Amino acid sequence: LKLFCSKAPLAMSVARRLAVSLRRPQARSFAIGTYVRDKPHLNVGTIGHVDHGKTTLTAAITKIQAAAGKAEFKGYAQIDRAPEEIKRGITINQSHVEYESDTRHYGHVDCPGHADYVKNMITGAAQMDGAILVVSAYDGPMPQTREHILLSRQVGVPSLVVFLNKMDMVEDLELVELVELEIREMLDMYQFPGDDTPFVKGSALKALNGDQGEFGEESVRELIRAVDSFIPDPQRPVDLPFLMGIEGVMSIPGKGTVATGRIERGITKIGDVVEISGFRDKPMKATVQGIEMFHKTLPEGQAGDQCGVMLKGVKRVDLARGMVCAQPGTVQVFKKFSADCYILKEDEGGRKKTVLYALSPTGVHQDWHYNCRGDFT
């Protein structure tokens, strides 16, 4: 925990200030509109093996919904915009976009598929009310396909819809039936309803390029309809005390410090006093100055919203991913606790060796991950 508490060296502080000053002329306003809550809001996302087309599908969804006046188009380069992502051509950090269907407003998380960035995938999946599992019909299920289904079950994603991508590359359609059967068996293995799960066949690249055929734009529209009908409306605990896990922290020049994350329960409004706990001996208090979701201001943030909260009374260096922002007096922080735990068997994706008396795993939960120790009795 000391790693999270230690202050940055002077050189890093100077470099950070220099970086902020260099970016200052390009800084834009905190928000560009007002969010209207006229439809149920759900958090969904794309999961699956690397290079199976998750980011391309995300871009295609925004393009098609933008043509219907229900989204702002985000191209591939706008979704994977970090220098390392551009250089390697893969998603590393989860990215967020928004769009609407006829009946819902969606916040969409594009998760990384590479095995090296599984912790970022967990952070994205933990926010979801449902997920789109993207599988290449040409390649079939791959290692991260199975792993992402397992992780979705472990972090509590309630429903999956499957998009069989790259159908334009498949020559023998009978092989697609075998791929679908294998995925349904995989879903059953991890307690998802394999027989009832919707499967949509298409090509995200064709859809992104404006193809009007069966596997082009129409397949993405069919996918949106499947998500609308199969993923149920979640019950939001808005009556409980406010709690939000901090996923990211940023400073907006001339504005203040913003903590981003998903509101787990309750409601927060501008002017509310909140308590920030975690990684420090004492909680810190701050005042909510503004709330934003997808660059649109909100009068209040509700349970289920993936939003940014501008805080007065704290600095960027005071906050870290993994802290929680809550109603004062409702959250306590402990360094040690007792719990009953179930250790996954090897065939469930768990350990191969027996645990004797202690275990030092990397703990991962929604917004944070760090090494911990468990003593067993």
Image (cartoon, rainbow, N blue to C red):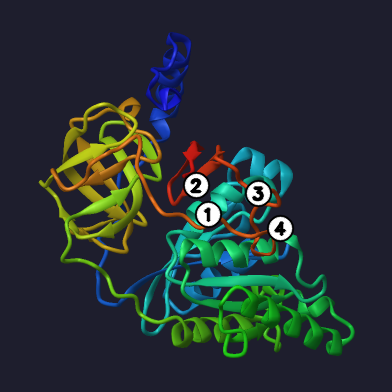
Which percent across, then down, holds residue 341? 46, 54
Left/right placement of residue 110 relative to residue 101 reads right
Name the residue at 85% across, 84% down: 175
Q: In the image, which disc is placed on residue 50?
A: 4
Picture coordinates of residue 265, whole percent (x, y): 25, 60
Of mark 2 and mark 1, the one earlier in the sequence is 1
Q: Are marks 3 and 2 in contact (CB under 8 Å)?
A: no
Q: Residue at x 55, y 37 (%)?
A: 360
What's the CA distance linking mark 1 and mark 3? Answer: 25 Å
Foreground: disc 4 or disc 1: 1
Q: As shown in the figure, which amino acid type bears the numbered disc 4?
A: Val
Q: CA distance from mark 4 to mark 1?
A: 15 Å
The count of marks equals 4
Residue type, numbered disc 2: Val
**4 or 2: tag closer to the N-terminus:** 4
Return the residue found at the far top. 10
Please say whether residue 209 is visible from this viewpoint: no
Q: Are marks 4 and 1 in contact (CB under 8 Å)?
A: no
Relative depth, front residue between 188 and 175: 188
Of badges 1 and 3, the one in the foreground is: 3
The secondary structure type at the circle numbered 1 is helix
Q: Secondary structure at mark 4?
A: loop
Q: Amino acid at mark 3?
A: Thr
